[in-house]
Image (spheres, grey):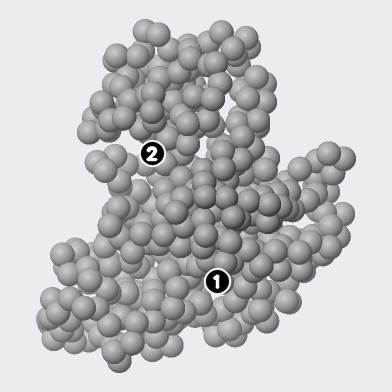
Amino acid sequence: MIKISLIITVYNTSEYLRRIFDSCIYQTLKDIEIIAVNDNSPNSRDSKIMREYENKYKNKFRCLWSNNENLGPGGARNMGIIASNGEYFQVIDADDYIELDMCEKMYNKAVTDGSELVACHALVLKNGTSYILCGDVDLRKNPLSYNQQVWKYLVKKSLILDNQLFFPEKTVADDCISALWYLTANKISVIKQPFYHWIRREDSFSSRYLAESFSEVILVLEKIYSYPAYSMLDKDSKYCFITFSRKLIYLAFMIVLIKKPCLLFDLCVNIKRVVSLYYSEFNFVGECMKTTNINCSPKKQLIDHTIEYICNNIGISDFENNVRDFYEQIWLDYFINQLSSIVPEYESKTYCLWGAGVFGKFYANCLEKTNLKFVITDINPIKHGTKITEEHSVSSWSDVEEHTDVILVTLYDGFESVKSELENDFNIDSSKINILDINNLIESVLITNKDK
């Protein structure tokens, strides 16, 4: 009996295929199959390497082809699920790799607990640095912090077949479906070990999607809202999914604002979808609040302001800059409120923004509108000396340590590992470190007090 089917989608990833294929072939659990799905890749080497492994490991390795049509990761994964023979399956990206005992430990956990989903942690590798991405965030308790990556899950195949929880197709936002898996599953287990190695490449398909498409998230969430499994959720579960959805929409919008402001007109084209998605669920969400004892209600503030601003300014030539300024002010207001609550006499301090990525740059642009003194550093020495705003460049920690009163860590996830690294590797007093949790900032804009 096949216990696990490992499903790998392949698209222009030939330089990484041997690594991921080998990490699957040499699993300590022997009752597995590997299914490589070629999603109409233009790279002939992809097909060559796939056939090489299929011929060498005939009893364990199979190849599927999408018949000259690009289905996107979701469609290719669906092909693999339907063709799979395993009791469980796990999807894997072709440019990542897994620990050799992953299948054995996750399968044993699933059988012991009787679970339909088993989650693991991931080791995230990006630009020479690494951190742990936790797979144990409880979507029901903390939907704003839930990470939707599907590859962290070992999934019982019957959960997908019985509830028709297949991936949305022809999109790269297909991993949103994992939230519906979570809310539908009867039993979920977690192994707090980083079995999965996530290689975050700037040129990957998903990275380009984040920077270049806002409408993808809207379209996929619309599809998932139409799934029968969604309509069968109880009120508390629907509220969790709606809150998770709002986070995705807002993050996608912010990334467009920061990285590709020229694509804000894509937002205009799709704004009616956003409105429809939010407004159709709003009255229902109000009812959800009564049953979940949350002392705030979603007031559509972000979308209301967006619609109003677009309607009033759609003909203005510098529309993009105006919208960017508008959202920076929303964030800045909350940022100052948060800062004043955690840092005594905050106006007299010198701050160090730790992290010069997308969100670090956004914070720096916001801070330049204040009278606060700040510097920017990053653990990656390649970024040192790089100018990320009109007035500020990235410095090394050794250059700014003496003048820093408060460190503000500006990351989206991996907070605990970064804080531990600052304390242990840089000998920084923990009282000096403050976490700027972007999830809290999202919550501040999207969820406001009922009386405000």
**Please, what is the three-letter code of the amino acid marked with disc 1?**
Val
Residue at the location (37% across, 7% down)? 402
Q: Where does label 1 land, which residue?
A: 220
Q: Is residue 292 above or below residue 381?
A: below
Residue at the location (39% across, 30% down)? 389
Q: Quadrant of the C terminus?
A: top right
Q: Looking at the image, is mark 1 or mark 2 earlier in the sequence?
A: 1
**Please, what is the three-letter code of the amino acid marked with disc 2?**
Gly
Which quadrant of the structure image shows residue 326? top right
- Residue lying at the far bottom of the rendered structure: 67
Q: Quadrant of the N terminus?
A: bottom left
Decide if residue 110 is in sight here.
no
Describe the element under mark 2 as helix, strand or loop. Answer: loop
Residue 239 image position (x, y, % from top left): 73, 60
Tag of residue 318: none
Residue at the location (30% across, 47% down)? 125
Residue 93 image position (x, y, % from top left): 33, 66
In this rendered view, identify the residue nearer to me: 200 or 190. Answer: 200
Q: Where does label 2 land, which residue?
A: 357
